[in-house]
Amino acid sequence: MQFKNSRHKRRFMGVIKPMDQKDKTQMAVAFLLTATKALWDRSRICMINNKILVHRIHLNHTSEEVYVLYCAAKDIAFGTTLISVSDLVDEELLSKELYLLIFTALEIKRFGVGIVIPSPQEKK
C-alpha cells in the first residue's frame, strides 16, 4: 500500500510541493499527517517555513486512528518510542491499514520520497 486513498495522495502531494523533498524525515512525517483530513486539519497550522513542527501539534477528542498516526509521526520526527515494535505486530492493536501506512512512512524515512512518488525518469 502506498497511500490510504486518493484524497491522501492529493493532500500529500500538495503539502510537499513547497517542502525540501530531500528531507526524508519531513517527507515521512508529512505522509503520516496527511493520511486523514482530521489529522491534517490539526497539523497544517503547525507548518512554518515549509516544515511541519510536530511538537506544536495538539490533539484532543480524536479518533484512535488519528492518535496512532500522530504518535508514529512523532516517533519518526524525534526518535521516540510511543509505538513499540510489539505494538506494530499486534493485530489487535493496529489495523493492517495503519500498519501499512506506518511502514510506508518508515520506507520514506529510510529511502526517500521516491518510494511513493516516481521520479520523472520512471514515469516515461
Image (cartoon, rainbow, N blue to C red):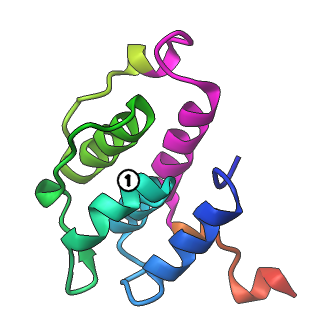
> What is the quadrant of the C terminus in the image?
bottom right
- Tell me the kind of residue under disc 1: Leu
What's drawn in magenta, residue-wise? 88-112
User: Is the magenta region chiefly helix, strand or loop?
Assistant: helix
Residue located at (64% from left, 55% from top): 3
Seen from the viewer's position, the closer of residues 51 and 36 is 36
Left/right placement of residue 15 relative to residue 55 reads right
The location of residue 123, given as percent across then percent down, is 82, 83
Residue located at (25% from left, 46% from top): 74
The location of residue 75, given as percent across then percent down, is 26, 41
Residue located at (24% from left, 53% from top): 77
Reply yes or no: does residue 25 show up in magenta. no
The location of residue 99, given as percent across then percent down, is 55, 31
In the displayed structure, 8 sits above or below 76; it is below
Residue 96 in which image quadrant: top right
Residue 60 in which image quadrant: top left
The extreme front residue here reads 61
- Say what secondary structure mark 1 lies in: helix
In the displayed structure, 82 sits above or below 124; it is above
Residue 109 in sight here: no
The location of residue 76, given as percent across then percent down, is 30, 48
- Residue denoted by label 1: 39
Tag 1: Cα neighbours inside 10 Å, few (<14), some, or many (≥20)?
Answer: many
